[in-house]
Amino acid sequence: PHFYNIQQALDSTYGFTSTSPISPEGLTGMNSWRVFTFRHGIQSQYGDDVLGNGLQEYVTSMEEIDQRALAKWIQWRDIAKKQGRSTLFGKLFKPENTGYIPVRKKEAWNESRGNDATTFPLAIAATAYVKGVLDHALREGLPITYATEDNTWQFQPGKRIILPNYATRVALDEQAMKYGMEKKGDPRLRDFHAEVLAFAQQGLKHEAHYLDPFQQIYNTGENPSTKLMKELRNETYINGSASHVDAARANRCLRRDYLDSLPVQREIQQCVA
């Protein structure tokens, strides 16, 4: 379960990749409305006792992941039954696909689900980030332990990994959700990812250049969401809410960045071929 837990600890990586600074209602003020909506939407609708999509405690076994999924599925099934939607729920959902937890256990791998749809270089960087950490840990046979105190972690190349506890991860999540990698707010997020980034770079060795987009965002403090809001403020955007025209401009900017990233995609495809 250690590698599953590492991916849980790295969940706030979406602070590098977020592309959703505008909510469906046109609200701003969050760097990742997508994560905010997924993680807090269930509780706001059905109460705090409902098993939602937020951060989870570390697991002690892979079987525990299945047990959690089943418990959530049963609870959501009962809610659907009260609403007269049992048939539809039964057709669409199974324990393994109910809800949208940050890391989902798959047959042959674990799926990190916090990152927004983003440009190709950032998608590759997000994958390389996790790969670099796991490769380093496996290659060096590093001990993986768990912090008991808040604000404590270690990613020491060639020595050890100490994963942050739940309370610290919640603080990192809140910072990433609100500010991304901006140089304001809680400094722990940037401190954490500076350490992990150096660790992952050593784990990747000759593939470390795939992390260059993350390094650039760390240096500038500007992920795609931050850049989008910056561009909108230079046009007609008014702080606090965004119009459908602002949303269209944001989509236009994202498409421009996507087209700019296509050469990188072709390069990767050629390497794979």
Image (spheres, helix red, strand yellow):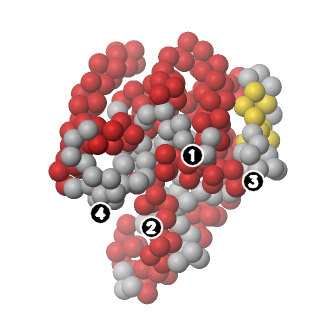
Q: CA distance from mark 2 to mark 3?
A: 28 Å
Residue type at the position of mark 3? Thr
Which residue corresponds to mark 2? 41
| Mark 4: amino acid | Glu
Question: Disc 2 marks which amino acid?
Answer: Gly
Q: Nearer the viewer, mark 2 or mark 4?
A: 4
Q: In this orientation, which residue lies closer to the viewer: 95 or 16?
A: 16
Residue at 49% across / 46% down in the picture? Answer: 179
Q: Which residue is mark 3?
A: 60
Distance between mark 1 and mark 3 Cα atoms: 33 Å
**Disc 4: which residue:** 25
| Residue beneath disc 1 | 185
Residue 10 appears left or right of 46: right
Distance from disc 2 to disc 1, alpha carbons, whole Å, reads 24 Å
Q: Earlier in the sequence, mark 1 or mark 4?
A: 4
Task: Name the mark nearer the viewer: 1 or 3.
Answer: 1
Place of residue 165 in the rendered image (x, y in percent of width and height, measured from the top left): 73, 50
Observer-side mark, 4 or 3, equals: 4
Alpha carbon distance from label 4 to label 3 = 40 Å
Query: Of callouts 1 and 3, which one flags the residue occurring earlier in the amino acid sequence?
Result: 3
